[in-house]
Amino acid sequence: MQQTIKSPEIKEFPLFEGQQTYERITEQITSIPTDRHPMAWTIMFGLGLIGAFALLMALVYLVAVGTGIWGIWFKKVVDRNTSEVLFDGTGVFLGGAYAGGSDGAFSVNTFIPLSMPSSNFTVFEVFILDIAGANAPGVDTAGLLLVEQDWVPEPASLIALATGLGALALRRRKK
């Protein structure tokens, strides 16, 4: 036996409420760009134009002057026994064309927190250098001379470990 499902009637709702005419609808729609806007809207529009002009000037400056020297580093530390990734991060270093950057030889010391202690690990590190407008190779190029890895236990982790061990000792002593 085949059943038929009777669908409920679909009511049609008016597209526009009230007594609307095409003339009134046209007036409402065209009033958006033609009527006077509130003062706050005008101020925000002006600030947006100033921001767009500032962006345009920054792009013109970037194209005219160049980006200078900058670089990105990628570092991954992997435990050799478990193949677990202990650290995976990136960073940026900037030349003298950038605020806070400097040209010439420099040293970067960066703290790298590992997710767990390990005495058997491999460090994968990649440096990407970009010199805008440089004739490579030449006096304008940069080079990476030495990457040194010094792994020192973090003091905060050692303090946390000592606090935990001390709390366990006190708890055991009270029992």
Image (cartoon, rainbow, N blue to C red):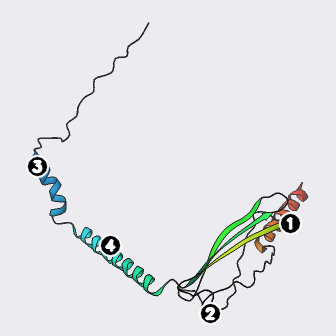
* Residue 143 rendering spot, x and y as whole percentages: 68, 85
Label 4 to label 1, Cα distance in Å?
55 Å
Contact between marks 4 and 1 (CB within 8 A): the answer is no
Q: Is residue 98 left or right of residue 123?
A: left
Residue to which mark 4 is pinned: 48
Label 4 residue SS: helix
Q: Position of residue 148 (x, y in %)?
A: 78, 80
Sequence order check, earlier mark of 4 and 1: 4
Which circle's residue, 4 or 2, is located before the other in the chain?
4
Tell me residue 97's x, y (percent). 53, 87
Q: Which residue is mark 2?
A: 139
Q: Nearer the viewer, mark 3 or mark 2?
A: 2
User: Mark 2 belongs to which amino acid?
Assistant: Val
Does residue 28 appear to the left or right of 94 in the view shown?
left
Quarter occupied by residue 119: bottom right
Which dot, 4 or 1, sits closer to the camera?
1
